[in-house]
Image (cartoon, rainbow, N blue to C red):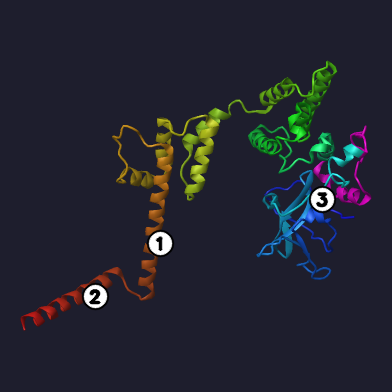
Amino acid sequence: MATTQSYGQLSNKFIQIFRRQQDDLPAHIKADVYFDNQGPGHPETGYYLDTPAKRPIEFIKANNTYHWVKLIRRQDTWQTNQRGIYNGPDIGWWIISDPQHPNHIFYEQELPTQPNTPDYPTTMEGQQEEINVATGQAQQDAQRINVITNPSNGALKGNPPSIFEGDRNKTHKFLLQWDLWAAVNRTNDTMKKLFSRIITMLSYMDGTCIDAWKEEQLQKLKEELDDRTLETDETLWDNFFEKFKNTFVNQNCQSEAYQELCKLKQGESLDNFFAKFKQLAHEAGVPLDDKGTIETLKHAMAKGLTSTIINSPNFDPTADVPWTFKEWEEQARKSHLKWKAAAKFTQTRQGLFQTFKLSPKQTYRKSNNQGRSNYWRNNKRTTS
């Protein structure tokens, strides 16, 4: 039986990953992944993607589920982070008959009556799970709540949202992660049945700032079902989601985003600047092609770049149809590339002067004198 190390919640911070020293994963999990045995304890022993680059990979338990993660070698250890999660077509996962599958428990056992009762498929899995105690019992409870998913419809796919602890500054990120995950699983019965969708979303909420609210919502759901409200009733989700937004969405986020947009200034990276500008404009609810937005963009960009765009041949300030945001962005990128090319040429030219210990003035005088002598030499030939 394969044992899987548990690593709690992955983040942008790199953590050490312990690679398997033997090929113990079933074929349906490995799919096109292969095991290279270089000997016990050898750092290159482990699983790899079947690609020309021979990319090291490992199957772990993290973020309340199982993932294949790509590995990199850092400080003589194998490491990964949140960005290392791999969902390519050449890997597999647990099937419904595997005890580790989240829906397998639904078939074989009833839900635990005690919230803190261990409910692990195997003894080895239980021992591995103890490693994750520091991440909080609530995350383990959240994982067990997910057994409500319809067993005939398979496991939920993609990356689930991070645990939401009630911090309003992180509400937007949590909802974005949730919307992406729900969209990937839109045909799954867990998302199609509104009651199951609510319970699943609640399972990704944990913390002292949200526990009381979560308990209140569970009680209200129970009361609605006792009143014979159908689990597929749209009002269940609409009412729940409206309560969540009213409680945890920052009502001043548009105003704050607009203030931040007005203060935004271009930095070293033009890509980061435009990405941030469009993000803040979206959060502030202002159209990108609005005249005021364009004026804000002009002042946000570097003065030299804005002047270059205005002085470019294809810009006409008297045109009946003013430039769109997309046109401003495209011209800004073209002008920026020209500036980078010119800067690179200047650096190369200065490097040549330094190599030959010449100054631009010396080079000019030498070439100028040579030109004069050639002129008189040619002139003498002509007269003779």
Q: Amino acid at mark 3?
A: Ser
Magenta segment: 108-136
Q: Nearer the viewer, residue 232 or 118?
A: 232
Q: Amino acid at mark 1?
A: Lys
Q: Nearer the viewer, residue 197 or 189?
A: 189
Q: Is residue 34 found left or right of 338 in the rendered image?
A: right
Report which residue position mark 1 lands on.
344
| Residue under the image location 70 percent in, 47 percent down | 11
Q: Which numbered disc flags the more N-terminal residue, 2 or 3? A: 3
Report which residue position mark 2 lands on.
366
Q: Residues within 10 Å of mark 2 (few under 14, many from 20)?
A: few
The kind of secondary structure element at disc 2 is: helix
Marks 3 and 2: in contact by CB < 8 Å? no
Q: Nearer the viewer, residue 56 or 303?
A: 56
Report which residue position mark 3 lands on.
6
Q: Amino acid at mark 2?
A: Lys
Q: Residues within 10 Å of mark 1 (few under 14, many from 20)?
A: few
Q: Position of residue 357 (x, y in %)?
A: 35, 75
Q: Which numbered disc flags the more N-terminal residue, 1 or 2? A: 1
